[in-house]
C-alpha cells in the first residue's frame, strides 16, 4: 500500500493522538465500571453502543450491506469471536481483578504480539530482534506485575493474565482481518464484525444469568451509563474508524507507532482519576515494553 502525503493527510497526526488519548482514558473508565456492573454486562452494553454508532456511520456514508460468501461469513464470524467476544470478556474480567495502570502497561504489548502473530501466520522469518523484542516486552510486564512479593499468582496476577489474553485475542483477529481486507473496506468489516460479536456477548449474558437481566441491573444510574456511552462511541466506534482511516492514509507501519502513547495516557489517567500509585517499577516496565514494541515493529533493512 502506497502512503498518501500532503494536505489530505494533515489531519492524521492530530486525530491519532486524540484517539490514543481516548484509548488511554478508556482503561481506567472500564475499571471504574466494574464497581456497578459485572464483566459480561459491561462488555455487552459497550459493544451495543458501538454497534449503534457504526450503524449511524454506515447511513452517513450510505454504505449498503455487503454481499458475502459463505467463506467470508465464516472468516468474519471468527473475527467477531476473537476481536469482540473474547477480547471484551477478557478485558472486562481482567480490569475487575487488576489495576488500571497494570492494564495499560500490558496492553502496550499489542504491537509486539501483533507482529509475532503476523510473522507466524504469513510465514515471515523470526529474526533475533523479534526474540529480543519478546524478552523486553514481556520482561517489562513481569517487572511491574512481580514487583510485590507474593503477587505472581494472586488475584492481581490472574487479572494481568486475562488482560494479556485480551491482547492476544485481538491480535489474532487482526491477522484474520488482514487476510480479508483486500475485498472488504474497513467500515464494512466493522459493520459486520461488531454486531456478530455483540450478539455473542448478549447470548453469554443471558446464559450466565439464566435469563434476561432485570432493568435495574442494566440501569445502575446516569453516571455509569455516561461512561458506557463514552467508551462505546468514542473509544470503540470512532476510535476504530479513525484508526482504519489513518492506515489508509499513511500506512500501517506509521500508524502503529502511535499506539505507544496508550500506556502513557492510561497510566497517567489511572493515577489522576483512580488515585493508583505509580513508582519506579512502572517507569522501568514502561520503558522496556515500549522498547520491545518499537523493536518488533521495525522492518529489517533489505539486502542491496
Image (cartoon, helix red, strand yellow):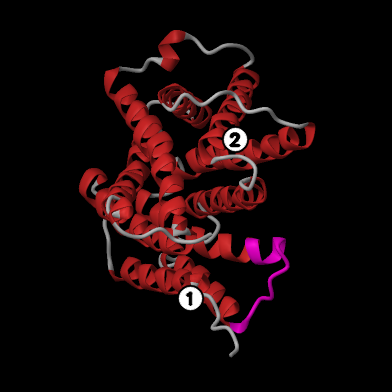
Instruction: Count neighbours of disc 2 (C-alpha within 10 A) and say few if under 14, some if 14 to 19, many if 20 or more.
Output: many
Residue 199 occupies which quadrant of the picture?
Answer: top right
Q: Position of residue 289 (x, y in %)?
A: 43, 69
Closer to the camera, 241 or 110?
241
- Residue displayed at 53% across by 13% down: 213
Q: Secondary structure at mark 1?
A: helix
Q: Nearer the viewer, mark 1 or mark 2?
A: 1
Residue 6 occupies which quadrant of the picture?
Answer: bottom left
**Quarter occupied by the C terminus:** bottom right
Disc 1 designates what residue?
295
Distance between mark 1 and mark 2 Cα atoms = 30 Å
Q: Is residue 35 visible?
A: no
Kindly check if marks 1 and 2 are in contact, taking CB atoms under 8 A apart as contact: no
Residue at the far top in the pictured view: 215
Residue at the far right in the pictured view: 70
Residue at the far left in the pictured view: 272
Which is nearer the N-term, disc 1 or disc 2?
A: 2
Q: Position of residue 263 (x, y in %)?
A: 36, 57
Closer to the camera, 280 or 198?
198
Q: Is residue 102 above or below residue 132?
A: above
- Residue 39 is labelled as none
Q: Which residues are magenta?
A: 118-128
Q: Position of residue 75 (x, y in %)?
A: 71, 40
Disc 2 designates what residue?
85
- Residue displayed at 53% across by 28% down: 40
Amino acid at each position: 500500500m502506497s502512503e498518501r502525503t500532503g494536505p489530505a493527510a494533515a489531519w492524521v497526526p492530530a486525530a491519532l493522538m486524540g484517539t490514543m488519548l481516548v484509548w488511554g482514558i478508556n482503561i481506567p473508565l472500564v475499571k471504574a465500571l466494574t464497581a456497578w456492573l459485572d464483566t459480561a454486562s459491561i462488555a455487552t452494553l459497550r459493544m451495543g453502543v458501538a454497534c449503534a454508532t457504526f450503524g449511524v456511520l454506515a447511513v452517513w456514508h450510505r454504505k449498503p450491506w455487503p454481499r458475502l460468501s459463505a467463506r467470508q461469513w465464516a472468516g468474519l464470524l471468527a473475527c467477531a469471536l476473537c476481536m469482540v467476544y473474547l477480547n471484551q470478556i477478557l478485558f472486562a474480567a481482567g480490569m475487575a481483578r487488576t489495576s488500571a495502570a497494570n492494564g495499560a502497561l500490558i496492553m502496550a504489548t499489542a504491537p509486539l504480539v501483533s507482529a509475532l502473530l503476523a510473522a507466524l501466520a504469513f510465514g515471515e522469518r523470526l529474526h533475533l530482534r523479534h526474540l529480543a523484542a519478546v524478552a523486553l516486552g514481556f520482561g517489562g510486564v513481569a517487572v511491574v506485575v512481580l514487583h510485590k512479593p507474593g503477587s505472581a499468582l494472586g488475584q492481581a496476577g490472574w487479572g494481568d493474565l486475562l488482560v494479556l489474553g485480551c491482547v492476544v485475542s485481538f491480535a489474532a483477529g487482526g491477522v484474520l482481518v488482514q487476510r480479508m481486507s483486500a475485498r472488504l473496506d474497513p467500515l464494512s468489516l466493522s459493520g459486520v464484525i461488531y454486531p456478530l460479536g455483540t450478539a455473542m456477548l448478549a447470548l453469554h449474558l443471558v446464559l450466565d444469568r439464566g435469563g434476561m437481566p432485570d432493568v435495574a441491573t442494566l440501569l445502575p444510574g446516569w453516571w455509569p451509563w455516561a461512561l458506557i456511552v463514552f467508551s462505546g462511541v468514542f473509544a470503540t466506534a470512532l476510535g476504530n474508524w479513525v484508526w482504519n482511516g489513518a492506515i489508509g492514509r499513511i500506512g500501517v507501519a506509521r500508524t502503529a507507532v502511535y499506539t505507544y502513547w496508550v500506556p502513557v495516557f492510561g497510566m497517567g489517567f489511572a493515577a489522576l482519576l483512580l488515585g493508583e500509585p505509580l513508582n519506579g517499577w512502572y517507569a522501568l516496565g514502561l520503558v522496556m515494553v515500549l522498547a520491545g514494541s518499537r523493536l518488533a515493529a521495525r522492518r529489517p533493512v533489505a539486502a542491496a
